[in-house]
Amino acid sequence: MMRGRRRLAAATLVAVGAVTFAVAGVTGTAQARTAAPAGAVTTATVPPALPALAALPARAAAYPPFTAPGKTLRLGAKGSAVKALQSRLQELGYMPGAADGRYGGATLTAVWAFQKVQGIKPTSTIAARTWRALENPRAPRVLVPRGKPTRVEVDLTRQVMVLYRGGAPVMISHISSGSGIPYTEYATWNGKRQRFSGSARTPTGDYTTTWRVKGWHRSYLGQLYNPIFFNGGIALHGALSVPLYPASHGCVRLPMNVAEVLPGMLGRGVPVHVRGAFRR
């Protein structure tokens, strides 16, 4: 995890393709604190109630109309054009945080997710091609056409997660899955220093959500925020680093603002379908 931090909008840092987040960017005013790894920002802005996310159209043609401001935006930008970007991303099921007119880390990962779904190379700059796609967006590619109406699809090829309700996407998020690079880690576990090895793969297949932990969960391979397990020790979870490439030991990392609300939207026993393969 990157240790350098600077405050930009809601305590975000962007460096060498990775994004480090405070638990922030969710609409609401209630404050909460959870145990976190040393050096992590622990104050979270959380909603007093879960957001009411409506099912989105299954076809892009059914999305509400949008006229892009057309202004080139870069990370750190502020103003009405940023707010229009955030509102449109929310409307399409992405998770940019509050529509506060500040282009920070939560908005950046939502932009990445949108660009990947649209077939645009992810970048922090919002220019003509991304604005055009926001005006005429395509829906996420369905991985399991005959899947249950409520399900999660994890696209390892595009590094995107989609939560469906009623057969339509309600949440689309950027992810970072298993790196595929074999690892050997040493950690003190159950009072003993132990050696842990693995393939760092996120296996494809069909699973269901099982147990979960609220807040920070310490595993022998690191810290997981609000983990929702679906394949043994593999979970959907928030992380302080969710780069533009697979980097985990096998779990599916999510931006912190997504992990903040996902447990309230995703119950136990929900199908999780993992498909694809990332090409470096």
Image (cartoon, rainbow, N blue to C red):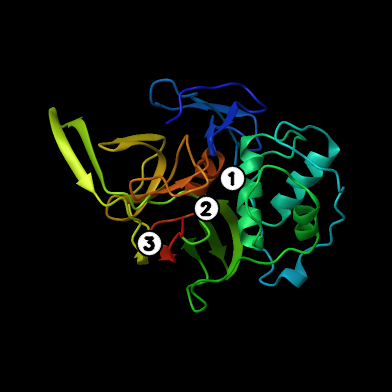
Disc assigned to residue 50? 1
Identify the residue shown where x is 84% and y is 57%: 66
Q: Residues within 10 Å of mark 3 (few under 14, many from 20)?
A: few
Which residue bears the numbered disc 3? 269
Identify the residue shown where x is 43% and y is 27%: 34
Residue kind at label 3, given as amino acid type = Gly
Q: Position of residue 160 (x, y in %)?
A: 53, 56
Residue kind at label 1, given as amino acid type = Leu
Q: Position of residue 43 (x, y in %)?
A: 53, 24
Q: CA distance from mark 2 to mark 1?
A: 8 Å
Q: Is residue 214 shown left or right of residue 141?
A: left
Q: Is residue 60 shown left or right of residue 244?
A: right
Q: Position of residue 89 (x, y in %)?
A: 71, 51
The answer to whether residue 275 is above or below residue 88 is below
Disc assigned to residue 265? 2
Residue 70 visible in the picture: yes
